[in-house]
Amino acid sequence: MKTVILAGGLGTRLAEETEIKPKPMVEIGDRPILWHILKHYAHFGHNEFYVALGYKGEYIKRYFVDYCALQGNMTVRTNEGIVNSHEREMENWTIHLIDTGHLTMTGGRLLRLRQHLSDGPFMLTYGDGLANVDISKLLEFHKRHGKIATVTAVRPPARFGRLEFDGDLVADFIEKPRQGEGWINGGFMVLEPAVFDYLDDDNTIFESNTLERLTAERQVAAFKHDDFWQCMDTLRDKKYLEEVWQSGQAPWRHL
């Protein structure tokens, strides 16, 4: 099944990193967060990707060209101008890098990919969030409910610690529980081609225009994921994901 990654936003809340690179190329460990996302989908057998490019899209193109060319060992014959690569261990991915406009909204980016996605259901997620969502179970859930869209509902980490009281005394202090209050759309969506009927033009915002219309028609199912999920909106988020990765216990890690 094809997987779309929205990778064209400006990433203004992470300006420390995104002044020189697009947000999906901010590194966790020694790999861009986009690589981590592709790796997660590929673990469940989904190896064909459409990356919707916008802001600094050439950076993403250059990365994958170099990533492919520079893997493994090389033999360079300087007098012949020949470079041979060998002993390469590469992921079996097909990555379509599609320019979808510098200022196009999320729904508009998806609409520009319509010609590539009209032959069956496909997956859609954002290029700045990591989770240990079971993609196979998500897909089974989508098929079982028969709706146009399925979103993965997550409970984001609380921004602040929580106090619990015993009368006027503090009984407990919980430092930023991993699961905050309420559910939000965490990405990792499955969509039917009928979704394109709910996309108008480049200015369509997928979340507030398309999903709201589909919800009003009872065409959005929610796959509840009550485990690890973390977006990378700020430098603090980036540092947290880096710490988790360096611990060797990252929930999204697939060897």
Image (cartoon, rainbow, N blue to C red):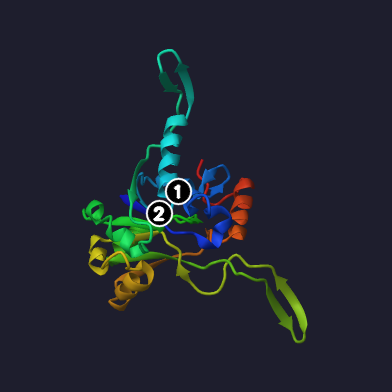
The numbered mark at residue 135 is 2
Camera-nearest residue between 103 and 225: 103
> What secondary structure is marked by label 1?
helix
Q: CA distance from mark 2 to mark 1?
A: 9 Å
Farthest residue, direction right: 169
Q: Amino acid at mark 1?
A: His
The numbered mark at residue 86 is none
Q: Which residue shows up at 33% across the image and 51% down it?
A: 99
Q: Would you say the residues marked 2 and 1 are in contact, meaning their CB atoms lie under 8 Å apart?
A: yes
Q: Amino acid at mark 2?
A: Ile
Mark 1 = which residue? 40
- Number of disc labels: 2
| Residue 30 x/y as whole percent | 56, 42
Vertical order, 156 against 129 (above or below)? below
Does 98 sit left or right of 66 as displayed? left
Numbered disc in front, either 2 or 1: 1
Does 220 sit left or right of 166 as displayed? left
